[in-house]
């Protein structure tokens, strides 16, 4: 029941959520409540597949995914930071736009509905890290996502940008009065977040599987939002939360193998996350009342 | 008002660009949308689509008035539909119809209250608890129609049909008397919101949670009450749809049309104002319905209207933000 | 005193004009400050002082006029530019990050780097050295959120020194300090001025301006009404220049005649930081009890506990003989408690909603007829309050935030007094309110007392406490450390108690 393959598949499922959650955490630290992760990831997934299809190279597809994700996140950046539009309204609209846009494009660009896949479509290769169980055999993006966690931690706590970013998130007026441009830092985190979501989408569409299907993000972006809250926008906290979800999801697939209906295991990760939230909130409230 | 018009034009221009880029004729496409939405044939489709969208928009607007976001509408909608089917298959006649509708509303209300209690007692933010509970609800319904409640005569994941005496009579093609129920719900919301102390207290909470707490408005109780009403209406919408053609629960049939998300957009756009939400929801429903017609006529993918809606909201959100900033130069 | 330099003046503002929609904030303002001078800028709220200083600090640009620094014209496009030119500002309310350390706060925006990353060691050394040199009492690793207000202000000054500011602007620096901390601050400022740095401080406190500054400029309605050496003026002249009227300074209202006990608090205890430590007090009908003490010593917590926003760890509260200790806010209000909170914008009102809406809050059930709350009833209720309390508003349908601070406060006061509750809790009733409205608000509070109600007043302004209170309690570190009658409550006695000395 619980073996290496379980963890391996959990890690595979983890990466898109992790990238998106890191994007959300970065934005949260700068005071931007970014719930457009779902839509941006979807755009990245489509761009990744389109790029790989038209250039014949999965890596160029990844590049296009990153570019597309960054460009798409400009909507939130301009709408929220420059114009002051409400982040929740914009986030929901951006997510809906992504669904509509990618469905529109899958018809007009690929001429199909539902799913686009083709044996000739290049996906990301699995890397063999000397055959280490569990850790070996994932795409490069998976390993990149793990490296992104400590990289982000260093950025936040040991780099001047990270300090300014945290200040901008805690008290923007104070940061502004010290000459730190709130606008520039918020644009920065949103665009960086867009790039990360692009990578998430690329892993989703070119790594785990090699196809694009409408709405394939299937709520992962929302799970990333929850992971940010559960992990209190800390890089390692968010990693732990995303890992929890990935494990619950992989465990769910395993349970299907012994005859539990798929729907029960579909629901499992969400219930697990909810329980984790109860526990974490209870601990916080207990600490606050002492 | 001027801003709405400007952003509408902007969205239409952007849409035209997109259309031209994919080789279609923008004017032809837009004309098809309008005739499709409001033409003699189209108006029925628009109405049929509008009923659940208006219902969901209002359901989500109820707590949004107090600044509370219910992201679990889909789960509540689905639970309401499946409960209605279960009751409708066991209780005959008009009593069955009433019981089914009540069961749907009750199911939605209870489920939403659970999420509310997660916030008030367990400290999980409503945004998160409603969202997280939505998926298991949908999975549960998906399970039911694939196993215990499965229609033996079909390979699709759907329930058996409701007996002929437990169906809502149709008003016109695709629209049942459920329409009046939904309209009544909107009217009740509008009256309670504008003219009762309870509605006032919800609005005050929306103005500022700290202000409301200072004034003695008890947030936990209010949260549960508002969420119960919200889930109840969502469940009622599900029941209304289930009691109309095709008189069965089909897995995914309530999700694919995006009733909930479009409803949420309408509620957000109108800042949860009861009548504004109604207008926005009807507008979006018309746009979507027109999109289907447009696709039939011009081969332009109907998703274009979803794109137009989203672009419109984005422009409006940006414009509203700009206005808000200009008003308080502080 | 001032050293006469042959150098050009440190700061010159000439003909500054700044307009906002509907108001002329600065109207041809001239200001000249010499190096090493301490210059006070005075005026009521809305007089244009903060706007003027924002222009100097680069946070705003003038519509007309010039700014010169050390004889050379400058035009700052941002605070960063002003900081680079040697100007530093300590804003009211401070610009500090509570979750960060003293060091991180000081270096923010001007971090020392090593190989791209933060050079924490260099930062700590620099901060420690500055602390030592200027006699400040800070530890570089302390978390700013844990520091008391007086030390937080020192962190602010440290920030300016780290950036080698030659011109320091301080906006209402003593608003949150005890008399002792104020003296300490003044010593530090005098030391900095002696080094040749220029100090501009914005204040409305007459006695402090007279004690500290070399020269003073007074603004009223955007225009300069007085500019002279401090030695050549006095409190009356300054007050007149600020308000345009002859102001009765230090008005003291006669004592009331206390009757039965309306509110009784026994052994109130709240864990935390700051806390409440076994606080007991009594409020009688027809009396005003004032609570003096520097912000952060438990006054806010006391009010929150009495009003029902915080649950007590121990102790009881009795209102007219009824134990309300476990009751939620709504029921305490129904039992006869009204409350004017210190945070007007967030807790006391909804700035975006209409005045009518704001004034109806708390009355929604009372105004409803057979379950229906009509908008007309709400508007009529609002109009009554507006008229009775002299609130200047275009109509009851305008957004609350369009009213001036004083009128907003009068509206809130009107709303709470209209409840006719036996006990009124009031916090900082005249913060951010101009002198004319201050007098009106004070008169209302005294009238409410004379109508037989009990008033508990918390204020950071000693003059306000001494004017209104029949009895004065002093809080320090969560305890009531002293109790004075009106006659005994002199500035000296209060100051001593506020700093922890007991009586």
Image (spheres, rainbow, N blue to C red):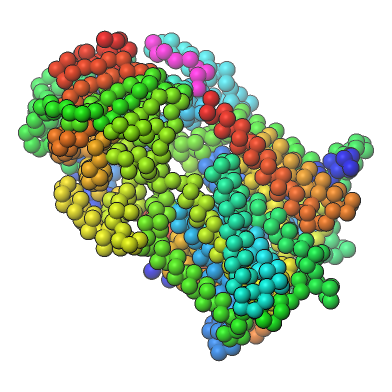
At which x and y percent is residue B84? Answer: 66, 69
Residue plotted at (16% across, 52% down): C387
Give the extent of the magenta segment.
C135-144
At which x and y percent is residue B61? Answer: 49, 61
At which x and y percent is residue B219? Answer: 46, 46
Quadrant assignment, res A48: bottom right
Residue plotted at (18% across, 18% down): C485
Which is nearer the eye, C341 or A221?
C341
Q: Is residue A257 above or below residue C34?
A: below
Q: Is residue C59 above or below residue C205?
A: below
At which x and y percent is residue C205? Answer: 21, 26
Disc tally is 0
Q: Is residue C371 above or below residue C216?
A: below
Give the quadrant of the N terminus of chain C: top left
Q: Is residue A277 left or right of B221 when viewed as pictured?
A: right
Residue plotted at (32% across, 12% down): C500
The answer to whether residue A152 of the structure is visible from this angle is no
Q: Is residue C7 above or below residue B100?
A: above
């Amino acid at each position: 029941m619980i073996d290496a393959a379980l963890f391996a598949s959990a890690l595979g499922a983890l990466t898109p959520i992790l990238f998106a959650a890191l994007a959300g955490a970065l934005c949260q630290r700068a005071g931007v409540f970014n719930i457009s992760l779902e839509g941006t990831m979807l755009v990245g997934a489509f761009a990744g597949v389109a790029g790989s299809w038209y250039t014949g190279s999965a890596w160029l597809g990844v590049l296009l995914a990153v570019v597309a994700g960054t460009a798409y996140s400009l909507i939130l950046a301009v709408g929220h930071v420059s114009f002051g539009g409400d982040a929740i309204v914009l986030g929901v609209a951006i997510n809906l736009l992504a669904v509509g846009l990618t469905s529109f494009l899958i018809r007009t660009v690929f001429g199909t509905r539902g799913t686009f896949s083709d044996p000739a479509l290049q996906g990301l290769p699995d890397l063999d890290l000397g055959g280490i169980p569990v850790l070996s055999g994932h795409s490069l993006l998976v390993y990149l996502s793990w490296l992104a966690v400590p990289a982000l931690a260093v950025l936040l706590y040991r780099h001047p940008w990270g300090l300014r970013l945290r200040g901008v998130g805690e008290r923007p007026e104070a940061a502004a009065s010290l000459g730190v441009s709130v606008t520039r830092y918020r644009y920065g985190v949103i665009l960086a977040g867009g790039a990360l979501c692009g990578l998430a989408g690329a892993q989703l569409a070119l790594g785990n599987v090699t196809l694009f299907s409408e709405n394939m993000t299937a709520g992962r972006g929302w799970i990333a939002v929850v992971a940010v809250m559960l992990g209190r926008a800390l890089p390692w906290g968010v990693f732990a939360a995303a890992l929890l979800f990935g494990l619950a999801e992989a465990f769910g697939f395993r349970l299907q193998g012994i005859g539990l209906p798929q729907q029960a295991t579909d629901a499992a990760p969400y219930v697990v996350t909810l329980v984790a939230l109860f526990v974490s909130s209870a601990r916080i409230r207990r600490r606050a009342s002492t | 008002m001027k801003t709405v018009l400007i952003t509408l034009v902007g969205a239409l221009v952007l849409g035209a660009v997109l259309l031209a880029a994919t080789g279609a004729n923008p004017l032809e496409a837009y004309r098809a949308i309008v005739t499709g939405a409001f033409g003699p044939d189209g108006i029925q489709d628009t109405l049929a689509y509008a009923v659940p969208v208006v219902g969901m928009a209002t359901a989500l607007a109820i707590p949004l008035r107090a600044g509370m976001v219910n992201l679990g509408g889909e789960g509540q909608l689905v639970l309401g539909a499946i409960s209605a089917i279960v009751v409708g298959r066991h209780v005959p006649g008009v009593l069955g119809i009433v019981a089914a509708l009540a069961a749907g509303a009750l199911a939605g209300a209870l489920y939403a209250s659970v999420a509310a209690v997660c916030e008030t007692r367990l400290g999980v933010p409503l945004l998160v608890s409603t969202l997280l509970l939505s998926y298991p609800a949908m999975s549960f319904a998906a399970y039911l129609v694939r196993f215990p409640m499965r229609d033996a005569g079909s390979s699709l994941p759907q329930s058996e049909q409701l007996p002929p005496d437990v169906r809502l009579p149709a008003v016109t093609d695709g629209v049942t008397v459920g329409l009046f129920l939904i309209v009544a719900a909107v009217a009740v919301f509008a009256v309670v919101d504008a003219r009762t102390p309870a509605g006032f207290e919800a609005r005050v909470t929306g103005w500022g949670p700290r202000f409301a707490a200072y004034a003695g408005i008890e947030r936990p109780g209010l949260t549960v009450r508002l969420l119960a009403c919200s889930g109840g209406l969502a469940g009622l919408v599900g029941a209304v749809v289930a009691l109309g053609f095709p008189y069965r629960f089909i897995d995914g049939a309530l999700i694919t049309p995006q009733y909930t998300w479009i409803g949420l957009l309408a509620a957000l756009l109108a800042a949860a104002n009861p009548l504004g939400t109604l207008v926005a929801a009807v507008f979006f429903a018309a746009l979507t319905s027109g999109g289907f017609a447009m696709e039939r006529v011009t081969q332009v993918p109907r998703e274009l209207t979803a794109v137009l809606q989203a672009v419109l909201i984005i422009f409006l959100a940006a414009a509203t933000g700009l206005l808000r900033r200009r008003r308080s130069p502080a | 005193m001032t050293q006469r330099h042959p150098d050009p003046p440190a700061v010159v503002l000439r003909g500054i004009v700044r307009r906002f929609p509907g108001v002329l904030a600065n109207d041809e303002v001239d200001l000249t400050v010499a190096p090493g001078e301490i210059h006070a800028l005075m005026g009521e709220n809305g007089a244009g002082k903060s706007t003027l200083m924002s222009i100097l600090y680069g946070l705003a640009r003038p519509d007309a006029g010039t700014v010169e620094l050390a004889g050379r014209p400058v035009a700052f496009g941002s605070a960063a530019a002003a900081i680079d030119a040697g100007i530093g500002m300590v804003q009211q309310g401070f610009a500090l990050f509570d979750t960060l350390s003293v060091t991180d706060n000081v270096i923010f925006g001007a971090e020392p780097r090593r190989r791209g990353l933060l050079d924490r060691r260099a930062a700590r050394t620099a901060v420690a050295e500055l602390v030592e040199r200027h006699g400040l009492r800070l530890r570089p690793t302390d978390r700013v959120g844990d520091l008391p207000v007086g030390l937080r202000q020192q962190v602010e000054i440290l920030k300016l020194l780290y950036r080698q500011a030659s011109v320091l602007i301080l906006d209402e620096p003593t608003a949150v300090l005890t008399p002792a901390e104020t003296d300490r601050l003044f010593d530090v400022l005098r030391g900095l001025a002696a080094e040749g740095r220029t100090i501009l401080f914005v204040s409305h406190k007459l006695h402090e301006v007279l004690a500290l500054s070399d020269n003073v400029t007074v603004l009223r309605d955007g225009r300069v009404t007085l500019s002279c050496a401090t030695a050549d003026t006095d409190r009356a002249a300054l007050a007149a220049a600020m308000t345009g009227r002859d102001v009765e300074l230090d008005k003291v209202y006669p004592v009331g005649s206390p009757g039965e006990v309306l509110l009784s608090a026994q052994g109130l205890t709240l864990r935390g930081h700051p806390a409440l430590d076994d606080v007991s007090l009594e409020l009688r009908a027809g009396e005003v009890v004032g609570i003096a003490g520097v912000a952060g010593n438990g006054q806010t917590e006391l009010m929150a506990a009495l009003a029902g926003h915080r649950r007590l760890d121990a102790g009881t509260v009795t209102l007219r003989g009824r134990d309300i200790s476990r009751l939620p806010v709504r029921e305490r209000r129904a039992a006869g408690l009204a409350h004017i909170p210190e945070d007007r914008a967030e807790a006391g009102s909804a700035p975006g909603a209409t005045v009518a809406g704001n004034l109806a809050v708390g009355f929604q059930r009372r105004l409803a007829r057979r379950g229906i709350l009509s908008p007309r009833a709400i508007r009529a209720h609002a109009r009554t309050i507006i008229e009775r309390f002299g609130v200047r508003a275009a109509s009851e349908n305008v957004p609350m935030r369009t009213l001036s601070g004083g009128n907003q406060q009068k509206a809130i006061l009107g709303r709470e007094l209209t409840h006719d509750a036996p006990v009124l809790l009031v916090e900082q009733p005249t913060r951010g309110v101009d002198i004319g409205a201050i007098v009106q608000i004070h008169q209302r509070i005294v009238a409410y007392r004379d109508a037989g109600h009990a008033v508990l007043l918390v204020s950071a302004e000693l003059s306000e406490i001494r004017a209104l209170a029949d009895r004065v309690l002093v809080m320090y570190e969560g305890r009531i450390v002293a109790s004075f009658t009106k006659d005994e409550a002199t500035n000296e006695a209060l100051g001593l108690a506020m700093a922890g000395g007991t009586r």
